[in-house]
Image (cartoon, rainbow, N blue to C red):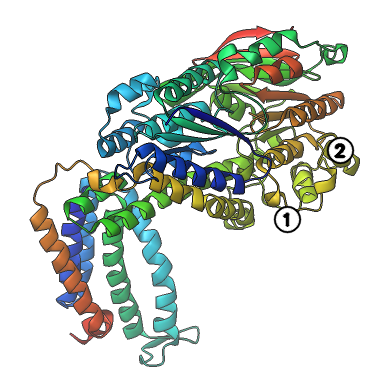
Amino acid sequence: MGEQYTRVEVTTDDNVLWQVLSEAEGLASAHSGGRSISPATAVGFVPVNPQMVFSGIWASIGDELSQIAKLHGTDAASIAKQFELTDLVGQKPQDLSGGEAIRAAVALVYASKPSVWVLDRCFEWLEPRHRGSLSHFFLSELQRGASIFELSSGRRWFIEADASPNTSKSQTVVRRDDRRPAEPSQPILELNNVSAMLSPRFTLGPISLKIRAGERVALVGPNGAGKTTLAKIAAGLLAHTGKVLVAGTQPERRRAWAQHVVYAFQNPDDQIFRASVRQELSETARRAGRFESHRLRNIAEIMGLLNHLRLNPLDLALSNRRLVTAGAALVPRIRLAILDEPTAFLSANQLQSLIRATEFFVNSGGAVISITHDPEFASQFATRTISIDRGQVVDDTRP
Amino acid sequence: MTPVTATVVTAVTVGLLAAAPPPEQVAIAAAVTMICLVVIERSVSPIALLLGWTVAFLIPLVLIHGLLNTQFPVSDTFYGVPIRSKGIAYAGVTGAFIASLFVVAVYWLRVKRDQFMKFLVVLGLPTALLSVAFQALSLVQQIDSRSRIIALAQRARGIDTEGNIFTRARALVPIVLPLTVTLLREARTRAAIQDYVRAQDAIHAPIAAKLMSFAELLIVSAGAGLLWLLLEQPPPLRLLQV
């Protein structure tokens, strides 16, 4: 059986995945060449939510990996080294960042020695370096004779990643004049010597920075660098030392904070609970006391959600659910919207819609911070790029 | 806390209750196991948890049997409200009985999931049963960590999830609904991962513990004691008759 790579675009959820898994099982049976091997255990399945791969019973990533390795007769230590997990083996799975969790999940699945891989949009949350190294790994799997099914949101991260298409795209994008930041104004967000120690392994800061109205800030850096931690501090969700000022004041209560800063999390399913897209889009604005119906309509129109307003958001595809939660953060007329990996699972068209929606938000006097590993999005979206590595700001540029 | 310690406590507590000692001894048994818990854990936090659970049961018991249950004679009145001292004593003994069982529950709560899983493996349970236990434990952990993330995600959009009981009650829908939907949506995927990746993971847990035959004996004894207790008349009533 020779190598085989199949790319499947996911426009709706679930059903495509089960068809692909069924096909993969059939292929795994063929790969086994008549040996008594379970087709199921020969399939390496990396789901869209990598946390699902971890049982949660074993105390650390290292324990999880060694359990699978023992079961399948593979070497946990060498696999951990291969996937650059040596520093993470003592961590609990739930403490990993999005990108770290994907690498660990792929390592766990690799420990089960699959002959057929099914990758469900697993490149979306990876930083470019790890996206490249995982692409190389899967290319070597193909050369070894494995087969790969990649479910994709429409954008190509794997195979072509070897030629770094995203990097080249990011260099050729024509920047538009209207993306210049507004005139310097009172900072919307001000961090003064902010620090947070999440574990003995990781301390964020001290970090000082100011975000002003009109800015679209791309927060970039390696997986586990502290981007989400910094964003949570900015949104008043995490205990810290140092001072955080929102619109010149230090909000004492959570509700006061939410009137100025809204944060859309990585996974849309963690936030959606209303019965219709319209209600979901308006929920955050109503809570903040900043709801304007025309803004909801504008955002829905820009994001291509107008025809979905009466639908239940849970019936939408993952990419549209992602747009709904990002849109809910952009509808209220507030100071700052923080979007965590908003481009994950979006098609190229949806990515452009998201950029236009952030422009709409910023033009009404706000600022947007977006955590991203997507160079194409960052180059088109950002008027300022803040790079974080190992809990420190290492670069802060305004192109 | 090791599973063996929790098993010993279970066996001793159930044995004491099953032996139907005088009410004072039930209270002493509960107190001794509580003190052991504090010593082992080097913390009083388990006692706070334990008292919280017990009081939640004790208050309605005292109200029902100490004031309302006409099967107990009225011994006194307070501003015209009848006080039934025997009913209060009955509620107290029942409360001590419940506290004793809660002590056992708290001991088991302190056992880490991986230790418990290895313990089940050592006991030599059938593969199917191990697999069920493994998935149940795994789901508990996933529900726990996911609900924390969802609560934080809802706070990030201005929904109060912390505060008094009314605030928490209002936050239930924004937390429980995404949690339930997510778990249902992901159930098939989790099942697939169980098949594809770990299959019989539980069986391959590393085993280093000793005294397993003793632990097995204790578990069987505790199970038999509990069964005997349940088949008899309600234990608190029996204790009052002593």
Residue B6 locus on image (x, y percent):
21, 55
Q: Nearer the viewer, residue B81 or A156?
A: A156
Label 1: how many residues lie within 10 Å, few (<14), some (14-19) or many (20+)?
few
Q: Nearer the viewer, residue B212 or B240?
A: B212
Q: Nearer the viewer, mark 2 or mark 1?
A: 2
- Mark 2–mark 1 Cα distance, whole angstroms, equals 20 Å
In this rendering, does residue A96 appear at all? Answer: no
Q: Nearer the viewer, residue A110 or A129?
A: A110
Q: Secondary structure at mark 2?
A: helix
Label tally: 2
The quadrant of the rendering that contains the C terminus of chain A is: top right
Question: Quick check: A317 above or below A231?
Answer: below
Q: Chain of mark 2?
A: A
Q: Residue at x 75, y 32 (%)?
A: A350
Labels 2 and 1 positioned on one and the same chain:
yes
**Which label was assigned to residue B8?**
none
Q: Secondary structure at mark 1?
A: loop
Question: Quick check: B56 above or below B134?
Answer: below
Horizontally, residue B176 falls left or right of residue A202, namely right
Question: What amino acid is labelled 2 in the image?
Answer: Glu
The quadrant of the rendering that contains the N terminus of chain A is: top left
Going from N to C along the chain, the mark reached first, 2 or 1, is: 1
Question: Quick check: B123 above or below A89?
Answer: below
Q: Residue at x 53, y 26 (%)?
A: A240
Q: Which residue is mark 1?
A: A275
Q: Chain of mark 1?
A: A
In this rendering, does residue A59 appear at all? Answer: yes
Residue B90 locus on image (x, y percent):
31, 81
Residue A213 locus on image (x, y percent):
80, 20
**Which label was assigned to residue A301?**
2
